Amino acid sequence: MPTVFTHAAVPLAMSLGLGREIISKRLMAAGVVVSVLPDLDVLAFRFGIPYASAFGHRGFSHSLLFAFAVALIGASLARPLLSTARGAFFFLFLAAASHGILDSFTSGGLGIAFLWPFSDARFFAPVHPLRVCPFGLSGFLSFKGLIILWSEVRWVWLPCMGTAIALAALRRRRASLSRGDLHENGTMG
Ligand SMILES: [Zn+2]
C-alpha cells in the first residue's frame, strides 16, 4: 500500500480542483476517510486471516463493490455532508475506488480483488512505480522510508496537485469571464 497520507491525495486534489461550491468541507473530509478506509483490512492479519483470502488484506474492502456501497451510504447522508445525493455518490465512489487503484501501482504484496465477489482474482496495474510501504512505523523512519515517500510524492502528489491547481485556475478564469459578461451586459443594458 502507499502510505495513508497518499491515499488522501486523491479526494484532496478533487476538492481543490472542483471547489467548495461543489465539494463542501464535510464531503471532502468524508472523502479522505473513505480513501483510507479499505486499509482497515490489515486487522485481518491479527485474526489470522491469510493475505490471499477474499477477507484478507487487499481483498473485499479494496473492491469496486465496496466503493459502491460506501458511496451509496454517503449519498444517503448527502444532507449532513452539505451535498446532493448524486454529488456525494460520485465523489465518494471515486475517493474509495482510488484506494485500490493506487495500491495496484505498488511494487509489492498481492494484487487487488477489484471484482470481488464475482471473482477472487487479484489485479495489478501494468506498471508499479510506487514502492510498497511497510506496515510498521519503524520501517518508515529509515532511508527506505524516504525512498517510499519520494516515489509517492513524484507519482501521486505532484500529478494530483498539478491537475487540481490547473482545474482550479480554469474554474476561476471561467468565473471571471462570466462576471465580465454580466458586467458588459449590465452596462450595455
Ligand atoms: Zn490498501
Image (cartoon, helix red, strand yellow):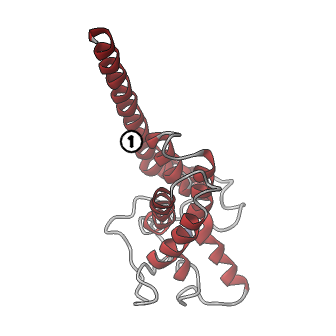
Q: Is residue 20 above or below residue 76?
A: above
Mark 1 element type? helix
Left or right of 31 in this view: 138: right
Query: Is residue 150 at least partly visible in the picture?
Result: yes
Left or right of 173 in this view: 109: right
Residue depicted at 71% across the width and 61% down the height = 137
In this view of the protein, which residue sits in the foreground, 57 or 183?
183
Residue depicted at 40% across the width and 87% down the height = 121
Residue 86 horizontal/vertical position (percent): 45, 60
Residue 113 horizontal/vertical position (percent): 45, 81
Residue depicted at 54% across the width and 57% down the height = 7
Residue 87 horizontal/vertical position (percent): 47, 56
Q: Quadrant of residue 64?
A: bottom left
Disc 1 CB within 8 Å of nearest ligand 1 atom: no
Q: Answer with the quadrant where ligand 1 appears in the image.
A: bottom right
Residue depicted at 69% across the width and 90% down the height = 48
Q: Is residue 39 above or below residue 14?
A: below
Image quadrant for the C terminus?
Answer: top left
| Residue that badge 1 annotates | 163
Q: Residues within 10 Å of mark 1 (few under 14, many from 20)?
A: some
Residue 97 horizontal/vertical position (percent): 46, 67
Q: Which residue type carries mark 1?
A: Thr
In this view of the protein, which residue sits in the foreground, 186 or 118?
186
Hey, which residue is sitting farthest top in the picture?
Answer: 187
Query: Is residue 143 at least partly visible in the picture?
Result: no
